[in-house]
Image (cartoon, rainbow, N blue to C red):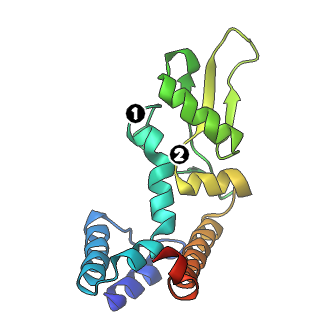
C-alpha cells in the first residue's frame, strides 16, 4: 500500500501525469477500514479522517439536494494566471428549499461560503454561492492560488489533523474514550 501510494504521489504531483481514480480511492479506503476494524482501533482511525468527515458534513446541503448540486464541484482553473479559484453555483433564493436556505444562512453567518447577489436589482433573487467542498472552502478563505499551493495546503491540513488526532488519542484520551 505504501509503495503504491508513494508512486502515485510522485506521478500525481504538480504537474500531474496520472490521476487518482475510483479504483485507488476504493483500495485505499478499504485498506484503512480493514486495518482499523481488525486492529480494533476504529475510533482512532476516524480521528485521522477529520478533514474527510468535515468535507462530508460541509457538503451535505448539496449532496442531499437542499441546494443545487452541479455535476462538477471542482475549483475552476484560470490558465492566464495559472491559479484555481472557488467554483460556484447559482440559485434563486425563492426556489430554494427552506432547509437549504437555513443551511446557507448558517454557512454565511460562519463565513464558510462566498455568497453574493448576481444583480444589483433588489427584485432579482438570484445568488451565486461557492460550492460546498473543503477545497473550495480553502480557496474562499485563502483566495485563488496555484494548484501546487492548494495541494500543499490540503496535505498540511491532513497532517495537522492527524497530529491533532494523535493528541486526542494519546494525550487526552481519558476525556474522549
In the rendered view, does 3 fall on the left or right side of 152? left
C-alpha gap between disc 1 and disc 2: 12 Å
| Secondary structure type for disc 1 | loop
Tell me which label, 1 or 2, sits earlier in the chain.
Answer: 1
Furthest-top residue in this view: 123
Furthest-front residue in this view: 174
Which mark is drawn over residue 132?
A: 2
Q: Which image quadrant: the C terminus?
A: bottom left
Furthest-bottom residue in this view: 3
- Image coordinates for residue 16, horizontal then vertical, percent: 47, 71
Res. 40 visible in picture: yes
Q: Which residue is rendered at x = 44% and y = 31% of the image?
A: 66
Q: Which residue is rendered at x = 67% and y = 38% of the image?
A: 108
| Secondary structure type for disc 2 | loop
- Image coordinates for residue 139, horizontal then vertical, percent: 65, 54
| Res 1 → quadrant | bottom left
Res. 80 visible in picture: no
Q: Residues within 10 Å of mark 2 (few under 14, many from 20)?
A: many
Q: Residues within 10 Å of mark 1 (few under 14, many from 20)?
A: few
In the rendered view, does 108 fall on the left or right side of 34? right
Residue that numbered label 1 is attached to: 65
Furthest-right residue in this view: 120
- Image coordinates for residue 97, horizontal then vertical, percent: 47, 23
2 shown above or below 113: below
Of residues 122 and 174, which is closer to you in this image? 174
Q: Which residue is rendered at x = 56% and y = 79% of the image?
A: 159
Q: Which residue is rendered at x = 36% and y = 68% of the image?
A: 20
Amino acid at each position: 500500500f505504501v509503495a503504491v501510494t508513494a508512486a502515485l504521489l510522485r506521478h500525481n504531483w504538480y504537474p500531474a501525469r496520472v490521476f487518482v481514480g475510483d479504483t485507488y480511492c476504493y483500495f485505499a479506503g478499504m485498506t484503512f477500514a480493514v486495518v482499523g476494524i481488525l486492529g480494533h482501533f476504529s475510533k482512532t482511525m476516524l480521528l485521522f479522517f477529520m478533514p474527510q468527515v468535515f468535507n462530508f458534513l460541509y457538503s451535505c446541503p448539496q449532496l442531499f439536494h437542499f441546494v443545487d448540486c452541479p455535476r462538477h464541484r471542482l475549483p475552476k482553473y484560470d490558465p492566464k494566471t495559472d491559479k484555481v479559484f472557488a467554483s460556484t453555483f447559482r440559485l434563486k433564493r425563492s426556489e430554494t428549499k427552506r432547509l437549504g436556505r437555513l443551511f446557507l444562512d448558517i454557512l454565511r453567518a460562519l463565513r464558510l461560503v462566498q455568497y453574493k447577489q448576481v444583480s444589483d436589482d433588489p427584485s432579482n433573487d438570484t445568488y451565486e454561492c461557492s460550492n460546498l467542498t473543503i477545497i473550495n472552502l480553502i480557496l474562499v478563505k485563502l483566495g485563488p492560488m496555484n494548484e501546487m499551493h492548494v495541494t500543499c495546503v490540503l496535505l498540511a491540513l491532513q497532517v495537522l489533523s492527524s497530529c491533532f488526532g494523535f493528541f486526542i488519542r494519546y494525550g487526552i484520551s481519558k476525556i474522549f474514550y
